[in-house]
Image (tube, helix red, strand yellow):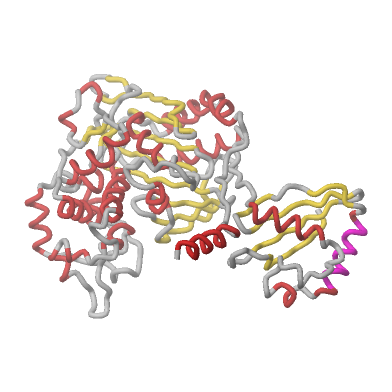
Amino acid sequence: MKALLALVLLTAGLHAQTYEPPKFIDSEREAKTRALMPKVDKLAHAYAKVHDYPGFAYGVILDGKLIHVGYGGYLDLNKKTAVQADSLFRVASMTKSLTTMAILKLRDEGKLRLDDPVKDYIPEMGKATISEDAPVITVRDLMVHTAGFPYDDPWGDRNLDMTDSELEAVFEEGFSLSTPPGTAYEYSNLGYTMLGVIVQKVSGMKYQDYVTQNVLEPIGAEDFYWEFSDIKPERRAHGYKKIADQWVEQEILHDGALAPMAGLIASVESFSRYAQMHIDAYPVRDGYDKGPVKRSTLREMHQPHRFMELITKYPFNERVSLPLSQSYGYGLIHQTDGEGRQFVGHSGGLPGFGSNWNFMPEYGLGVIFFTNATYADAQKINLQILDFVVTKAELKPRVLPPSKELIQKRDELIKMFPQWNKGEKSGIFASNFFGDYNDKRLKKFSKELLKKSGKIISVGEVEAENLLAGSFILYGEKGNLKIRIALNPENPALIQHYRIQEV
């Protein structure tokens, strides 16, 4: 039996798939990014000036490090208390990703499932329906805003300090739905409040305590608060709203039962530690997973789980507008622009505050921006900063090294090029290949292109698209040829697709 097992393991190892994580190839990327920070300061300060923000603070993260912090204006307009690097702002709905992280941590521990009916934890939800054929509302629905609840920022933002007993009374009265569950995206603070209630019931801890002890403290992020009265007055931002061209101070609400949707208070430095954890989830790799949740769980949060909208022209700067597709992940928003660049983050808004954080997973770059202005559009400046840094520093996404499988298939393919002798018997092509690519046509076309390019001088490195697809250049005396191959899902992977063209 042991001998048989050893043989099975040995045989499996003969065609074990290889993986080397993608990596940055520009050794000067940090230096070039740091050199742009004075210009980033100008962008941020100019944006704040145009919008007349009372106070603001921002930070730039690169490769898991907070490399720059900037700030300006006042925390308190009456006392002229200036914003400092460690000033604390209520980050509002940027809290939501901490709530989903708590849910996912409990999921990973086997204590709940995302497809559990919400009524299992909040019995009153059993009556929340529009029609008899509507699906049961699940934990996942709450996470991606498809439970059917109405958009409720006006109501939720003014009830942040609701007590537990007041929230229970709301539950007891039942719920009103705006759309059939599971059919449409509609942003719901009540849904995220319910997620907090589920965290409490499953963990046996108060929501704020669970997040603090199981998410924030493990990453060394100490400078977080839920209750504003716990903060030294000289460090706390007062919130303002512009009314008739005057900034009017807004009441700051105490910590309450709606904290899971918008209650966190943080500095740029402390929130950067949380942001760095998300950025560090990339690339996919082996090695120690230090938590507080798995890197794969973080990446799961970042995925576009529910489509939100397509903005046809988003202004990345004064000269360039691009399409921007937005989808909701788990407490985070995934965006892809017209150039294929991906952004992950979330905005926050409350009476008195506006904030945003966004990062680019493939570039290892992130930005945080806090203001004490009601519903300030902080995302706009953050995407402008990200676009500016990537463009001016000429940052490139990580490059995936070609897998051994791709390199091997390139080498084997070149040996039979352009005659294609014994192609069907070579053992490197999938069963579909010669049905899709006629043997005679392959020979004829290959010879025609080779005649144009002249004698092949060298073969280029494989540029991987993924582990099983890539291209390489044949450098000729008179011209170059580009060959693309894609392998199939069998083990070992075989060539199922082939394309050759002049370049």
Pick the front one: 233 or 27:
27
- Give the left or right position of residue 300, taking residue 152 as reference: right
Q: Position of residue 367 (x, y in %)?
A: 44, 36
Q: Image height check: is 37 above or below 306?
A: above
The reply to whether residue 140 is visible in this rendering is yes
- Give the left or right position of residue 341, taking residue 403 as reference: left
Pick the front one: 150 or 342:
342
The reply to whether residue 246 is visible in this rendering is no
Pick the front one: 455 or 482:
455
Q: Image height check: is 75 above or below 137?
A: above
Number of numbered discs: 0
- Give the left or right position of residue 130, taking residue 124 as reference: right
Pick the front one: 377 or 146:
146
Instruction: Please give the name of the residue rendered at 29% of the width and 36% of the height, measured from the top-left corner.
Output: 218
Q: Is residue 356 magenta?
A: no
Query: Where, by quadrant of the figure, is residue 228 drawn?
Result: top left
Query: Where, by quadrant of the figure, is residue 289 drawn?
Result: top left
Instruction: Please give the name of the residue rendered at 27% of the width and 61% of the height, measured from the top-left corner.
Output: 113
Q: Image height check: is 111 above or below 359?
A: below
In the picture, the quarter occupied by the N terminus is bottom left
Span shown in magenta: 441-452
Q: Position of residue 19 (x, y in %)?
A: 56, 50
Instruction: Please give the name of the residue rendered at 61% of the width and 44% of the height, measured from the top-left corner.
Output: 399
Q: Position of residue 480 (x, y in %)?
A: 84, 51
Which residue is farthest bottom? Answer: 132
Instruction: Please give the name of the residue rendered at 73% of the width and 77% of the height, measured from the top-left corner.
Output: 435
Q: Main secondary structure of the magenta part?
A: helix
Q: Image height check: is 295 above or below 107?
A: above
